[in-house]
Image (cartoon, helix red, strand yellow):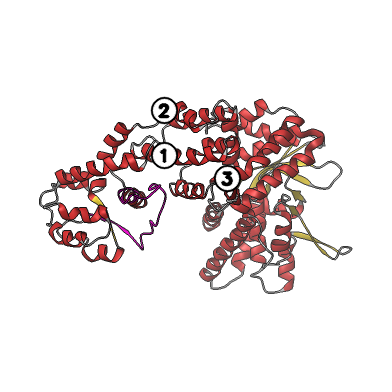
Amino acid sequence: MSKIKFEVKGIGKLIKEEKLCVPIYQRPFSWGKKQIDELHNDLKEAIDSNTDEYFLGTVVLTKIEGENKLEIIDGQQRITSIAIFFATIREFFISDMEKDAIQTYLSDYDFNEGNNVPKLELSSQDNEFYREFIINKKFEFPKTKESHNRINEAFGTTQQLIKKLLNFNNGDLKALIEWKDFIDDKLKVVFITVPTGSNAYTIFETLNDRGIELAQIDLLKNYLYSKAGKRLNEAQNLWIEIISKIESNATESLVLTYIKHYWASTYGFVRKKNKALYYQIRNNVKNATQVISFLTNLKNDLDKYLAILDENNSFWDDYDEKCKEYIKTLNFFDFEQYRPLLFSILRKFEPIEVKKALKIILSWLVRSLILGKLSGGPLEKAYINTAKSISDRKITKVKDLKNDLKKFIPKDDEFEDGFKTASVSKHKLARYYLIAIENYHRGKKSPELLVNTNPDAVNLEHILPQKPEDNYPNFSEEDKITYLKRIGNLTLMKTKENNDFKNSSFVTKKQKYKQSELWVTNMLGDFDDWNKEKIRERQSELANLAIKTWSLKFE
């Protein structure tokens, strides 16, 4: 083959007539239910409208030198999803002859080996599961990776589609044949076959440069493999080890986040948009030695990053018990802006400094959250710049860390003023704030640590209720909107008690508040009425306690 070949073909015939494989630099199967449903809906609409042909986009393939196979440079998700469709409809046909006819889309039988040889080979992470589950119909085959669950989900989603289709057609299997024929001849792709011996890595990157949307994680893996040279096997093993460890602890989507946070904490700020991380790595990692060094460092530091996400990680066994509680509390908020900073701290600080850092980061997070500064770009950039300073050993103590970020962290007076007027929409956050202040008032050590915020045990109570009816004449309609979610208008009640009288007048509620064991609630018994002035008064008192609850002291 001496030149690039373009051909328009039904994707069903492409799958049936060619032997296809997913190259090593491609990610595992990644389509979820949403993408599978979209494909099914597009197919159904095209078939129902009797469309002559429906284009499914471009598929790019390259010939494997010395083998009768084509590598899928672009199009893996669509091809795999259609193959799964054929595997699914195979199970609805009754006769062996019909089942065997569908099987020809999926595999060839090797008489010498005595088994089915798949016409589509997936990546090393997925291939065994795909072969056993999809090709050989071993539906109990163990799912050990997230991508295996997605293949299973795609199979199940397709099953549901076919059941609906057959129910609508009174069980007539000709409806399935109609779909099969459409996929064979009318569901068209433009497939491009590039010359034998062409550099697949270069082709993959060129597709990205020409505007074909490729996932950043695919581009990264492709680039690193392309630069690994004779150390490709070593690079592959390191990459697979990283992916496998992440997938056994979290979701595959964490891979890119981890690499981004590693890079930012080590080399400095990197933007989220326009594949900036990929381009930064490409500009700095340029040869096999650098590739192996980069991947080795990623692998070696991964345990520390995973420890940020899980207080039960064995990493914390060598640290003060309080560290686990701080990690649990930080994860309660479900933010990631502070992670590059904490990542550098875990990599470089002594354990005693880590404990201090966790405490003060939690206070910073809450203060920034109350003031609406947490999602701001300047704070995220400041965290990352400080993380790099820690990586460079310019900062080794929490006192220096605090000094480096002092202009970005809300001081006591700013935090208190912000707390006095703060409104909270998320119930879980409001419960946490009130419980932490309650703990401080009770003299509990480390009041900011997470305790029971389960709404089944303690519920958020709006003193001025969400549906006040005529029981709160002191509030105009505008006042009700303004003050409903103010912290001063919120308290804590046992769930059943809250449900029993939540829309009652303040006079009625007040008697119940007096019986509460919680100071933040029984203090309401001292108020003779409830109006916006009382809300401001109570919130000011809570604000004064908040600066002590989320203290900037780390000793």
Mark 2 belongs to which amino acid? Lys
SS under mark 1 = helix
Q: Which mark is residue 406?
A: 2
- Name the foreground residue: 82 vs 412: 412
Question: What is the C-alpha distance between the residues marked 2 and 1?
Answer: 13 Å
Q: Is residue 405 above or below residue 34?
A: above
* Residue indicated by mark 1: 365
**For the residue labelled by badge 3, is the local secondary structure a helix, a strand or a loop?**
helix
Amino acid on which disc 1 is placed: Leu
Residue in front for this viewpoint, 469 or 11: 469
Residue 139 visible in rendering: yes
Closer to the N terminus: mark 3 or mark 2?
3
Q: Is residue 461 magenta?
A: yes
Which segment is the magenta one? 436-463
Q: Badge 3 is on which residue?
A: 254
- Residue 127 vs residue 34: left or right? right
Residue 361 screen position, x and y as percent: 45, 38
Location of the C terminus by quadrant is: top left
Q: Viewer-nearest of labels 2 and 1?
A: 2
Q: Residue 122 vs residue 552: left or right? A: right
Label 3 is placed on what type of residue? Answer: Leu
Report which quarter residue 197 is drawn in: top right
